Image: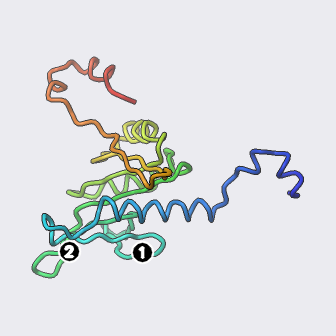
Amino acid sequence: MTLDTRWEDVDQLLDRTARTIDDKRAKAIQEIAARRFQFPTPKHPAYRTHVNVPDVAMGVQVGREEIAPDIVVVEKLTTGETHLVISVAVANAEQVSAAEAKRTWARYAAIKDVAFYLYVPVGYGARAKQICRKLKISVEGFRTYRTTPRGFEINDVSEQPSPLAALMPPIVRKILATP
């Protein structure tokens, strides 16, 4: 493609390169880890946060397979062993898809007794919820992120279950459920 062609086709001009996509995602992961998973804290002095992007800092052994969620929080026990507490996946716009959900999110969510959080760009929260609901992926919390002129912003888009929901017939719960 020549420079003249690129200027004539605005869609080609606006295409992000793989390097740009990867750099932006890595920066988002670092920001999320710094803002939401800054351990140890006075309340959780034994917790430690590990970021697995761009290099794997702490893999997780699941059966015979070793996986590396974007962010992992482990509890360092007094015996010297570590216990996985939280796993986090951070997706960019291109990764909010059923294929990515099956490939990675489902594996992270399937880890027994571990809270799984999913971070997606603003505007993709409803799509991520829809995909996870369809594929029966259990997510502890959905969050969206974006960079604004004021800085990096994270929003919780999970709904707390209503105590009245258990009393509603299933058809009513389905109608009132957000996408």
- Vertical arrangement, residue 177 with respect to residue 34, above or below: above
Position of the C terminus, as image quadrant, is top left
Q: Is residue 27 above or below residue 148?
A: below
Residue 146 horizontal side relative to residue 174, left or right: right
Please report the residue visible at 15 percent of the width from the left and 82 percent of the height from the top: 80
Q: Residue at x 28, y 36 (%)?
A: 159
Residue 23's disc number? none
Residue 51 position, x and y percent, is 38, 70
User: Can you identify the residue that label 2 sits on?
Assistant: 82
Q: Residues within 10 Å of mark 1 (few under 14, many from 20)?
A: some
Q: Which residue is mark 1?
A: 56
**Residue at the location (35% across, 65% down)?**
34
Is residue 113 shown left or right of residue 95? left
Residue 172 in the image, given as x and y percentages of width and height: 27, 17
Taking depth in this image into account, of 54 and 167 the one nearest to the observer is 54
Could you tell me residue 7's position as x and y percent? Answer: 83, 50
Distance from Cα at disc 1 to Cα at disc 2: 17 Å
Q: Residues within 10 Å of mark 2 (few under 14, many from 20)?
A: some
Q: Position of residue 71 (x, y in %)?
A: 36, 64
Marks 1 and 2 close (CB-CB < 8 Å): no
Nearest the viewer among 116 and 125 is 125
Of mark 1 and mark 2, the one earlier in the sequence is: 1
Identify the element where label 1 is drawn: loop
The amino acid pointed to by label 2 is Thr
Label 2 residue SS = strand
Q: Which of the 4 quarters of the picture holds residue 110?
A: bottom left
The residue under label 1 is which amino acid type? Val
